[in-house]
Image (cartoon, rainbow, N blue to C red):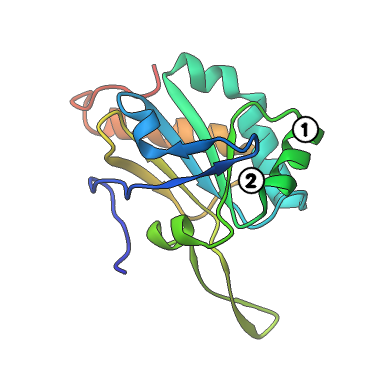
């Protein structure tokens, strides 16, 4: 699969969340979406990222966004993770890695000279029409909300306001 880019239609996805409910991209038609892919529940970076988005969840709602996290962990793992940290948004259990692969968030990684397949931490900002507005491949896990808002604000300023503001 080729790498996704800004301005492209977001790939359709469907999966089961921490409450055993089926969630799909179609559920967010007409809404903006922060779709983030993370490696594993209850690990330091993933917990920091998820908690940062959760702590700022009301800001996202005020700006017209929903937040959805995706990892290869099980529904049960997501239930425990969401309960432990009071996460208020959907976490999709992508145990078959179908969504991860569709978004290019599953691939070859290297650590300590070892090569292996794993989750490539990535966040996609998707607009009301299902089009990818921004992609974050270098995620600041502790300040991800600020990172997203600053980037979107800079895009609006760069385009001299021609693009409808996604952050105001």
- Of the residues tagged 1 and 2, which is closer to the observer? 1
Could you tell me if residue 153 is visible in this image?
no
Q: From the viewer's side, name the closer residue of 4 and 145.
A: 4
At x 39%, y 30%, the residue is 27
Which residue bears the numbered disc 1? Answer: 83
SS for callout 2: helix
Q: Which residue is nearer to you in this view: 166 or 58? A: 58
Of pointers 1 and 2, the one earlier in the residue sequence: 1
Count neighbours of disc 2 (C-alpha within 10 A) and say few if under 14, some if 14 to 19, many if 20 or more: many
Q: Which residue is mark 2?
A: 141
**Relative to 81, 61 lies left or right:** left
Tell me: residue 59, above or below residue 131: above
Q: Nearer the viewer, residue 66 or 73?
A: 73
The vertical placement of 159 against 92, above or below, is above
Left or right, residue 135 beside residue 155: right
Quarter of the image where the N terminus is located: bottom left
The quadrant of the rendering that contains the C terminus is top left
How far is disc 1 from disc 2 in space, using C-alphas? 20 Å
Tell me residue 111's x, y (percent): 66, 77
Marker disc for residue 147: none
Q: Position of residue 2 (x, y in %)?
A: 29, 67
Q: Residue at x 48, y 58 (%)?
A: 100
What x and y, as percent, mark residue 98? Answer: 45, 60
Q: Residue 65 at x, y = what percent?
A: 44, 25
Say which quarter of the image contains residue 129: top left
Give left or right: position of 58 versus 65. Answer: right
């Amino acid at each position: 699969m080729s790498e996704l880019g800004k301005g492209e239609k977001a790939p359709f996805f469907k999966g089961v969340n921490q409450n055993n409910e089926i969630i799909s991209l179609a559920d967010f038609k007409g809404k903006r979406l922060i779709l983030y892919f993370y490696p594993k529940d209850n690990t330091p970076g993933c917990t920091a990222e998820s908690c940062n988005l959760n702590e700022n969840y009301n800001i996202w709602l005020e700006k017209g966004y929903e937040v959805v996290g995706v990892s290869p962990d099980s529904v049960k793992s997501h239930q425990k993770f969401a309960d432990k940290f009071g996460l208020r948004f959907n976490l999709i259990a992508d145990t078959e890695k179908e969504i991860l692969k569709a978004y290019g968030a599953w691939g070859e990684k290297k650590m300590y000279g070892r090569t292996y397949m794993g989750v490539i931490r990535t966040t996609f900002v998707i607009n009301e029409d299902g089009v990818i507005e921004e992609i974050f491949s270098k995620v600041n896990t502790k300040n991800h909300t600020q990172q997203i808002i600053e980037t979107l604000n800079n895009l609006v300023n760069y385009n001299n306001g021609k693009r409808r503001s996604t952050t105001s």
